[in-house]
Amino acid sequence: MSRDAPVRPAPVEAGGAYNRSSRVQAAGLLPAVDLFEAAAKDVELPHEPQSIVVADYGASAGHNSLLPIGVAIATLRKRAEPGRPICVVHTDVAENDYTTLFHTLATDPHSYLRDDHAVFPSAVGRSFYQQILPSNTVTLGWSSWSAQWLSRVPAPIPDHVQVAYSRDEAARAAYARQAADDWIAFLTARSRELVPGGHLVVLTMALDDDDFGYTPLLEGIAAELADMIREGVVSDAEVQRMALPTVARSEADLTAPFAPKGRFAGLSVEHLEMFVADDEIWRRFATDKDAKGFATRWTAFARASVFPTLATALDDGPQRAGQFFQRLESGVSARLADAPEPIKIPLAKMALVKQSWPR
Ligand code: SAH
């Protein structure tokens, strides 16, 4: 993709929906927080008066950023001069719910602002597939559950909403190409923004061998959409247009830009681990046997993360979105409650470092 190409926004429901319904993401990102803490311990601090800058790429409404950014700040505080200013830049697309983000920073009991008066948060509303901060300014970068969103829908998916479940070779190839181009664009831009010696930690959706995971959820969505067509709630043409521009990457996909010398645009991979996150919702069900609770929690994850994107395919989208959300949510939830089973959550966590100035 040309870096000037228009970027398709990843829509969100306003009013803090993501903050309330992103327990799966909050739990899934935990294993990457250790990497971010280690990065905050190791990174070279800029000399005053240069600021320490922590960037958060794909922040959504902010709730899930509080822990990783808070851990980084606590670690940096132990190393920096007392009262040293730390700038935190939360970035997302222009349409993001920044009102909830700043409200969360101001009021959440776990906000990193609570007892630190030398932290200065701000936001950038531009796609991270281009450079969005000045060159050589970012000390630490964090990005969780965001780099799996492609910059655009590269092709229709005729037989599913998620390309990993499609048998259409042309769609699969178009998504694979876009995923490779976008990963390169993401890394290139971050490399420019990081200070020499700066660290970046990325947590993103990944393949477990070849498995995308989330099977009962995605099959539930596909089956419910088929029912909704039969009942005339949505048209065939609308469902044909529904495509989630998200990809899970393999270890080979993530490391491809770094071949053969282990370096790309001045960045090198310090750590890469493919893992399957614990399905906390299933674990709770195993104890309480509450099938409805299991189904409600997993459907809330789907609603917050992918329903808004599906709704963009509706004619008269804004008017019909509410009804569409409710019907899809109750239908998918009923299907999951009928036959609860564990849901696989494959992820990758990665720590990258930008080459230091030569000494
Ligand atoms: N980091 C949070 C939120 C992840 S939700 C967490 O771990 O839970 C994914 C976010 O990525 C959404 O808010 C979405 O708008 C954002 N996103 C998707 N594509 C983007 C792009 N091209 N540029 C910036 N943000 C993007």
Image (tube, rainbow, N blue to C red):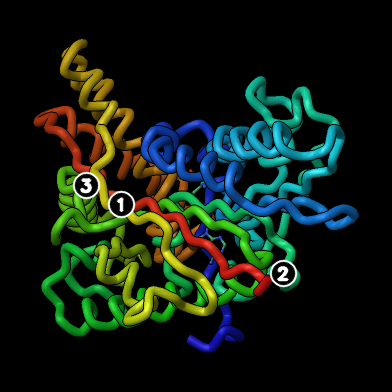
- The Cα–Cα distance between marks 3 and 2, rounded to whole angstroms, is 38 Å
Of residues 2 and 158, the one nearer the viewer is 2
For the question of whether residue 160 can be seen, the reply is yes
From this view, report whether residue 184 is shown above or below residue 163: below
> Which of the pair 34/295 is nearer the observer?
34
Q: Residue under label 3, please give it.
A: 214
Q: What element carries label 3?
A: loop
Relative height, residue 268 to residue 18 (above, below) = below
- N-term-proximal mark, 3 vs 2: 2
Residue at x 50%, y 77% (from the top left corner): 185
Camera-nearest label, 1 or 3 = 1
Residue located beneath label 1 in the image: 273
* Quadrant in which residue 188 is drawn: bottom right
Q: Is mark 2 within 8 Å of ligand 1?
A: no
Q: Where is residue 73 in the image (x, y as percent from the top left)?
A: 68, 37
Q: What element carries label 1?
A: strand
Q: Mark 2 points at which residue?
A: 136
Q: What's the amino acid at mark 3?
A: Tyr
Badge number at residue 21? none
